[in-house]
Image (spheres, rainbow, N blue to C red):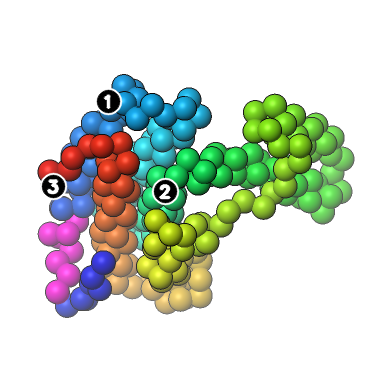
């Protein structure tokens, strides 16, 4: 991805292009993907078909949310959504590498649930709140892990997206690290954002347009990756 030159970047032109991509082109391509997935020409197992649909729906949902930021003063939101789309690009490619990698991400949904349960218990302990739900949830998670995944024990050590970005077949490591850090500077209430950039409306507008353009690029790349995985020839 090329570096965007502040002096050559046409905000109005790029914003119009982003809007057109988010309103028309990407949704049309995602609809084509849905139609192919429903036919399941790839012979995906039920869990893998559901995973593919969930990934596509996440792309669609984040594109819709990014579209809503256009024309509004929403730099942190645009940066956060673009960051989400960057991560989805990694996960789409990762899950397309092999059945084993897709299964790992499938398993990690339960590891995330395990982590949330542990965090809930920590919050209750810190606030002096009596907590019975964490114990119940932990047992339910253990039961699902055993019955659905064949795991006698499951921890909360999920695969980090930064590590997934470096795996063979994904090969986005260097791009991911730099882009993720850059977008995080605008998504989180950093000193630079709160005490500096926020008070400069024109700079905020410019940066938001760039974040939106990046988010559209990540969404388009994710869509291309899914199309390649399920055998749709892209004509763009």
Q: Contact, CB < 8 Å: mark 2 with mark 3? A: no
Q: Which disc, if any, is residue 85? A: none
Up/down of 119 relative to 231, above or below: below
Q: Nearer the viewer, residue 234 or 43?
A: 43
Mark 2 or mark 3, which is nearer to you? 2
Q: What stretch is highlighted in magenta?
A: 8-15
For the residues labelled 2 and 3, the Cα–Cα distance comes to: 23 Å
Provide the secondary structure element on which disc 1 rests.
helix
Q: Which disc, if any, is residue 35? A: 1
Which residue is at a point 52% across and 43% down the rendered structure image? 100
> Which comes before the other along the chain, label 1 or label 3?
1
Q: Does the magenta stretch include residue 164?
A: no
Residue 232, horizontal then vertical, whole percent: 22, 37
Q: Is residue 14 magenta?
A: yes
Up/down of 155 relative to 145, above or below: below
Residue 117, horizontal then vertical, whole percent: 73, 42
Q: Name the residue under label 2.
A: 97
For the residues labelled 1 and 3, the Cα–Cα distance comes to: 19 Å
Q: Which residue lies furthest to the top in this view?
A: 39
Which residue is at a point 15% across and 53% down the rendered structure image? 16
- Most common SS among magenta residues: helix
Which residue is at a point 39% across and 50% down the rendered structure image? 93
The crowd level at tag 3 (other Cα within 10 Å; few <14, some 14-19, many 20+) is few
> Which comes before the other along the chain, label 2 or label 3?
2
Q: Name the residue under label 3.
A: 236
Q: Can residue 180 be seen in this view?
A: no
> Which comes before the other along the chain, label 2 or label 1?
1
Q: Contact, CB < 8 Å: mark 1 with mark 3? A: no
Please indicate whether residue 19 sits to the left or right of residue 152 in the image.
left
For the residues labelled 2 and 1, the Cα–Cα distance comes to: 22 Å
């Amino acid at each position: 991805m090329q570096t965007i030159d502040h002096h050559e970047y046409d905000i109005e032109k790029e914003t119009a292009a982003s809007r057109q991509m988010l309103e028309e082109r990407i949704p049309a391509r995602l609809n084509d993907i849905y139609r192919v997935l429903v036919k399941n020409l790839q012979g995906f197992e039920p869990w893998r078909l559901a995973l593919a649909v969930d990934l596509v729906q996440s792309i669609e949902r984040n594109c819709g949310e990014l579209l809503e930021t256009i024309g509004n003063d929403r730099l942190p939101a645009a940066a956060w959504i673009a960051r989400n789309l960057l991560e989805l690009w990694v996960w789409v490619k990762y899950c397309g590498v092999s059945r084993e990698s897709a299964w790992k991400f499938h398993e990690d949904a339960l590891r995330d649930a395990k982590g949330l349960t542990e965090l809930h218990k920590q919050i209750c302990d810190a606030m002096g709140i009596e907590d019975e739900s964490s114990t119940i949830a932990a047992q339910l998670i253990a039961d699902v892990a055993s019955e659905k995944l064949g795991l006698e024990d499951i921890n909360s050590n999920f695969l980090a997206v930064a590590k997934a970005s470096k795996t063979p077949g994904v090969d986005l490591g260097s791009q991911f690290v730099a882009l993720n850090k850059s977008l995080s500077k605008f998504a989180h209430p950093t000193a630079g954002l709160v005490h500096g950039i926020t008070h400069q409306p024109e700079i905020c507008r410019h940066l938001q347009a760039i974040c939106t353009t990046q988010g559209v690029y990540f969404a388009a790349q994710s869509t291309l990756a899914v199309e390649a995985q399920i055998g749709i020839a892209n004509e763009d």
